[in-house]
Amino acid sequence: MERMKIKVSKTTEDHLTAERNVRLLCEDARVQRFLAKNHLDEQFVRRNYADLHKWLTQLFNCDRCAGLDFCTQPFKGRILNIRVDADGFLDEQYEPCRYQTEHDRLMKPRRQFLYADFSEEDYAIDLQKIDFNFVGRNEAYVRAYSRIIDSFEDPKGIYLYGQPGVGKSYLMKGAANYYTKSGKTVAFVNLPKLIPASRAYEFGRIHETIRQMNRADILFLDDIGGEHITSWTRDEVLFPLLEERMNNRRKTYMTSNYDLNSLQNEYMAGAGQNPKIATDRLMERIRTLCDVAELKGKSLR
């Protein structure tokens, strides 16, 4: 589409300029389609040529646009559209352009995350597009992948354990993306980040995150057992969280470097009063919420 160079006259005296503007507009294919669709004639163009020229100018800029970062429209990501109202007057509406529409489509699932320890690249992980020919993705990887896919139809989540770097978090982030695209609210929380070695802020610092974790339809606890373990983190953070989710039948997934027996030993070391009883109660919640799957293999990092 070639850009028309029309000088819009604001005076009724410049008749020649106005006639030239009308002629150029009437020759434009988009204007012709608009007139035909709405059963309009040249007189409509004469009455509205300034607005029609503005419309075509914005369409021209949109045709050349390389993306939202390069948008020159008055309203970023919006393109002017026109229609004729019931009284025959030209009505202007700003609607999302093709780039804004695609951006909104990609961003919609993100709004389902109540909390996400994600990088920008993590939001693009799609379990349906995983390349199983990638080095390190062996039969064990396929089995773990299949267990996660099967869990989508089950009431319980998956406790996925294995050595560091084998791809546990990657698979679970793909699962989290699946659930957000399905309309579920999701919290994906890396426990070592949530519960650092310092207890300076204690419960108050993480209270809001825990509230979001409880609200989420689907919760992912990444690297459980990798956090700084104390009786406080075990008994005042994790146990109430898992108890709440178990009682409300809210689906929960976990990743860990430890199998369940080793994880139990780690939490036993948290000391406190009656560590065995406290740890047994915690482990019972984990087993109730999750089926267990192992991911074997070499580090993919």
Image: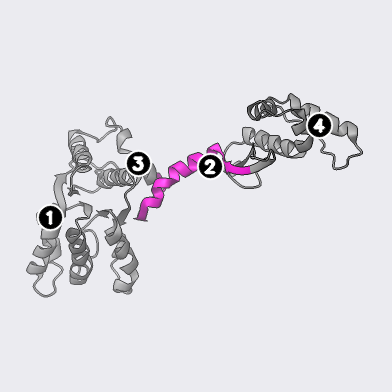
Part of the protein shown in magenta: 93-121
Real-space Cα separation, disc 2 to disc 1, in angstroms: 44 Å
The residue lying furthest to the front in this view is: 87
| Type of amino acid at the residue the image marks with label 3 | Ile
Q: Which mark is residue 21?
A: 4
Q: Are marks 4 and 3 in contact (CB under 8 Å)?
A: no
Q: Which mark is residue 288?
A: 1
Quarter of the image with the C terminus in it: top left
How many numbered discs? 4
Real-space Cα separation, disc 4 to disc 2, in angstroms: 32 Å
Residue designated by label 2: 100
Please tell me which residue lies in front, 55 or 175.
55
Is 100 a magenta residue?
Answer: yes
Residue designated by label 3: 125
User: Picture coordinates of residue 263 (x, y %)?
Assistant: 14, 57
User: Picture coordinates of residue 44 (x, y %)?
Assistant: 75, 33
Q: Is residue 23 visible?
A: yes
| Type of amino acid at the residue the image marks with label 4 | Asn
Please tell me which residue lies in front, 25 or 207.
25
